[in-house]
Amino acid sequence: LPRFRREARSRMNLLELLGYFNYWVFAIVLTVGLYTVIAKGNLVKKLIGLSIFQSAVFLMYITMDKVEGGTAPIFQDGVSLYSNPLPQVLILTAIVVGISTMALGLGIVVRIKEEYGSIEEHEIQERDRQ
């Protein structure tokens, strides 16, 4: 009997862990994006890391938005639990800001390439020291 309880407990722990799957994915994607921004010397790779980081934040907001049993915020008879539309609006705004940031960043990288002849951070810093 104790063996069956342990197995049932381990299955329950696994199900609880899988219940947080979206948060684990968020943490991993956020970490990958942050690592890319910090560790890479290529400016385009840094921008890609920034985009990955932003995508992780979008995933977090979308994950927090879902309400179990909630419906769209349209008043109906017999419905008392609604999902909050604010996170969706914030995500749409954040996507536009992210695209604008990426476009501006790529424009700056093109200008840096024209001026310095490279998009590698260490080469640009060496040239600045001269």
Image (spheres, rainbow, N blue to C red):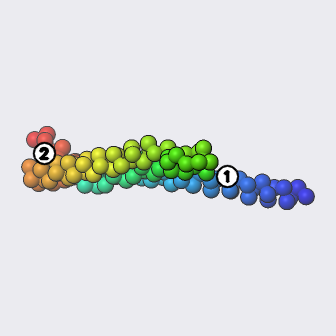
Q: Which is nearer the N-term, disc 2 or disc 1?
A: 1
What type is the residue that disc 1 sits on?
Glu
Front-lying residue, 39 or 52: 52
Please say whether residue 68 is visible from this viewpoint. no
The residue labelled by disc 2 is 127
Tell me if mark 1 has few (under 14), some (14-19) or many (20+) residues whose alpha carbon lies within 10 angstroms of its own.
few
What residue occupies the far right of the structure in this picture? 1
The image shows residue 96 at horizontal and vertical percentages of 29, 49
What residue occupies the far front of the structure in this picture? 77
Residue located at (49% from left, 48% from top):
74
Quadrant position of the C terminus in the picture: top left
Tell me the element at label 2. Answer: helix
Give the left or right position of residue 23, taking residue 122 as reference.
right
Please say whether residue 117 is visible from this viewpoint. yes
Residue located at (9% from left, 53% from top):
114
Whole-angstrom CA distance, mark 2 to mark 1, is 54 Å
Give the left or right position of residue 100, taking residue 39 as reference.
left
Residue located at (44% from left, 42% from top):
86
Front-lying residue, 96 or 34: 96
Residue 118 occupies quadrant: bottom left
The image shows residue 102 at horizontal and vertical percentages of 25, 51
Give the left or right position of residue 100, taking residue 8 as reference.
left
Nearer the observer: mark 2 or 1; the answer is 1
The residue labelled by disc 1 is 16
The image shows residue 104 at horizontal and vertical percentages of 20, 48
The image shows residue 93 at horizontal and vertical percentages of 33, 45
What type is the residue that disc 2 sits on?
Arg
Q: Which mark is residue 126?
A: none
Tell me the element at label 1. Answer: helix
